[in-house]
Amino acid sequence: MTALAFTGDVMLFAPAALADRPPGRLVINLEAPIAPAHLPPAPGKVVLRATANHLRATFGDTLAAVNLANNHAADFGPAGLAATVAACEAAGAPAFGAGSSADGCRQPLLLDVDGQRVALLGYACRTTHPHVAGEDAECGVRPLDLAPVVGDAAAARAAGATRVVVNVHWGIEHVALPRPEDVALGRALVDEAGADLVIGHHAHVAQPWETHRGRTIAYGLGSFLVPDLDLPTEYDADGVAHGRLTKRMWPWHRRSLVAAWDPGSNAVRWSQWYFDGARVRQLRDHARDWALAHDPAGYPARFRRGVLRDTWRDRLGNYAANPVLPRPRHLRSILRITAGALRAGGSR
């Protein structure tokens, strides 16, 4: 069996090491674009950037493709996105999921794997605040809406694809349960778009997975390789930073899932991985306990409890690591989080 092994988020500000061989050719979500230091960042948002290409040094020959359908792919405009695509190609891994409207955001990416013609598609939910190609940005991603995915999947089948994998950047950061509307959408991607596999990321913690009509929906694979963050951000139009992103990766952020998928049988083998800040290693347990037990009637309340629990866990941990006096913006954030948790998840 030749497998594609899907991981969650990757940010490579410096080389890291793979302590164990992946269970297949890797398809990663590259969260931080690889862009030269002189390129100006998008103003008014959190931006991420690696100024050197560490893909080959970290992954060697294990990469199959790189997903760029996320909220940071176009943080440094068309030139930054082009540099990122070139860096991926230099590492032997074609990129998909971000570009211009004219090129369909560089998708579908078609790969021949194990006798199957596999189409890789990528989308970012608007709630993650991505740059949307042709709408609010010259280049960026396709937004996660069902109708375009249905059309793109049909076009991929017409182009010869025998399997369609839909990568989705969605969910709430640091919350270990998928939103109720994402559960419904994930199932619709199978039912209406005919996805053979749905791969989710963005939350930076591992979320459950389920099998729906014989197809796997991985709601969130977590952070495969994300270091502690201490970066300037919130740039103005003149390129001056007015903020700093400081975020410590706690043990629950460092544990992730890898989905090794056999395109021939459509079967998925699960493994758990851990990034210790320098290397990624496979854990002994096999991840079966991550399966989603979904009670439609009781799930919204379970999700609300999960939002409160996971958000406060992160906030209290960050406060203990960096104690500061609360500011008005901190209080506003607390009120916003609490109010959001009283709802089932808000609208797309």
Image (cartoon, rainbow, N blue to C red):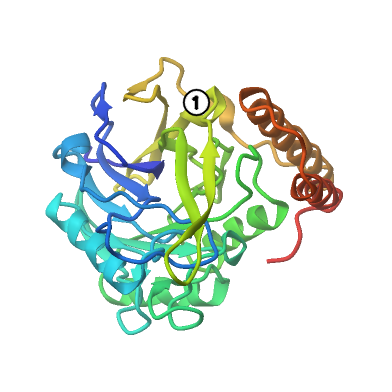
Residue on which disc 1 sits: 287
- Position of residue 150 relative to residue 25, above or below, is below
Q: Position of residue 317 (x, y in %)?
A: 66, 26
Write the residue at 56% across / 71% down. 146
Please tell me which residue is depicted at 38% across the width and 76% down the height of the picture. Answer: 139
Q: Nearer the viewer, residue 348 or 165?
A: 348
Q: Quadrant of the N terminus?
A: top left
Figure quadrant of residue 346: bottom right
Amino acid identity at mark 1: Ala
Q: Residue at x 29, y 47 (%)?
A: 264
Residue 141 rendering spot, x and y as whole percentages: 43, 69
As helix, strand or loop, the secondary structure at mark 1 comes to loop
Residue 200: where, in percent of width, then height?
50, 50
Left or right for 256, reference 348: left
- Mark 1, residues whose alpha carbon is within 10 Å: few (<14), some, or many (≥20)? some
Please tell me in which quadrant of the rendered image residue 185 appears.
Answer: bottom right
Quadrant of residue 155 in the image?
bottom left
198 and 194: which one is in front? 198
Q: Is residue 204 above or below residue 161?
A: above
Q: In which quadrant is the C terminus drawn?
A: bottom right
Relative side of 36 to 10, left or right = left
